[in-house]
Amino acid sequence: MISSKDLFRVTLLGTGAPPPSLDRFGPSTLVEVGENKFLFDAGRGALQRLFQLGIPFGDITGIFLTHHHSDHVVGFADLWLTGWIRRPWGKRVLPLKIWGPHGTHQMATHLPLAFATDIRVRAHSYNAEGVKLEPSEIKEGVVYVDDSTSITAFEVDHGGEKLDAFGYRIDHGSRSFVLSGDTTFNENLIDHAQNTDLLVHEVTHGMGDGIERANLERIRANHTIPEDAGRVFSRTRPKLAVYTHILLFGDATSDDLIPATRATYDGPLVVGEDLMQFTINNEITVTRMPQPPPSTTRIAF
């Protein structure tokens, strides 16, 4: 049995991207480290995945944002407001801490204005502290530290997208985890991912034809193809590399990702799935959480 102070577990809450897939929810990663629970990004469905894990949002220590593209933050309002409600899946009674790039203060200032009516009405029933937001805009460097854990943000290259974008490295004792965020092939990421145990990296694969080709070429220029991801893995040599933020075009499927990566990388590699968990000890244990069967509701008219 792992003690709470020794726990270092990463759960992929959502491994998708903008497409509204039911199999891959929006980008979001839960990191349980020591006695803290941090979320990295808040894509669609993040609250539902926490519910499936039996983790109330009131247990979340804070949220780190890689960047402000909508697919990475569209689930934030749900986490924040639904997580405030005094039910087993909510119960947040402390202000929500958010770390993120430029634009995080703006988001934290204007969201309460957009939901002012809801907040005013529910404040009569719930702890008013639980709906407050405490934003911190970050630069590259250490952005969080406690007795056993440090979290470092590092700049990545989201291609032609004109916004700040970060990856994160979490160190807990001698163990570490790196999340790439959205990026093209990036030397800064390689520098920060040296000697890491677990490297979770975004990927895009496939190319369509016809009128959409130019748009797909633009998107591919903002992300990492498997061959380039393999070069990252080969130069960092993590104990385990994992794909997330899986963006596929044309006839490409997730089954194609590992064969495409093998041209440049021959080490351990897993294609991430929603609710897949990685426990980091001397070895990395991979657990696939069972997905619940679809439910059927009968509606009387």
Image (cartoon, rainbow, N blue to C red):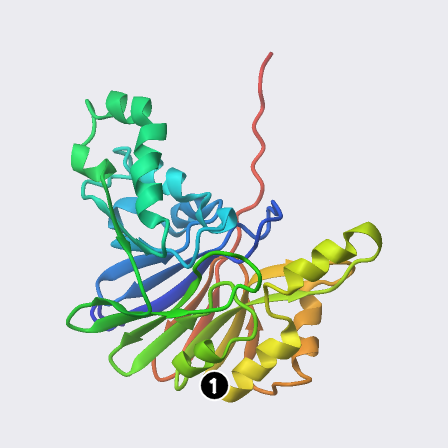
Q: Classify 149 as above or below 41.
A: below
* Position in image of residue 26 (x %, y %): 51, 50
* Position in image of residue 295 (x %, y %): 56, 37
Which residue is at 67% across, 59% downward? Answer: 218
Residue sitting farthest toward the left: 147
Place residue 225 in its image quadrant.
Answer: bottom right
Residue sitting farthest toward the right: 210
Q: Quadrant of the C terminus?
A: top right
Q: Amino acid at mark 1?
A: Thr
Which residue is at 78% across, 60% downward? Answer: 251
Q: Quadrant of the N terminus?
A: bottom left
Which residue is at 29% across, 38% downward? Answer: 109
Which residue is at 25% across, 33% downward? Answer: 86
Q: Classify 122 as above or below 221.
A: above
Q: Which residue is mark 1?
A: 236
* Position in image of residue 153 (x %, y %): 34, 68
The answer to which of 221 and 115 lies nearer the viewer is 221
Place residue 133 in its image quadrant.
Answer: top left
The answer to which of 30 and 161 lies nearer the viewer is 161
- Can residue 56 be seen in this snapshot? no
- Can residue 98 be seen in this snapshot? yes
* Position in image of residue 111 (x %, y %): 35, 35
Image position of 68 (left or right of 39): right
Image position of 59 (left or right of 50): left
The answer to which of 270 and 228 lies nearer the viewer is 228
Q: Secondary structure at mark 1?
A: helix
Place residue 255 in its image quadrant.
Answer: bottom right
Circle 1 Cα neighbour tier, 10 Å, few/some/many (<14 / 14–19 / ≥20): many
Q: Classify 95 as above or below 210.
A: above
* Number of disc labels: 1
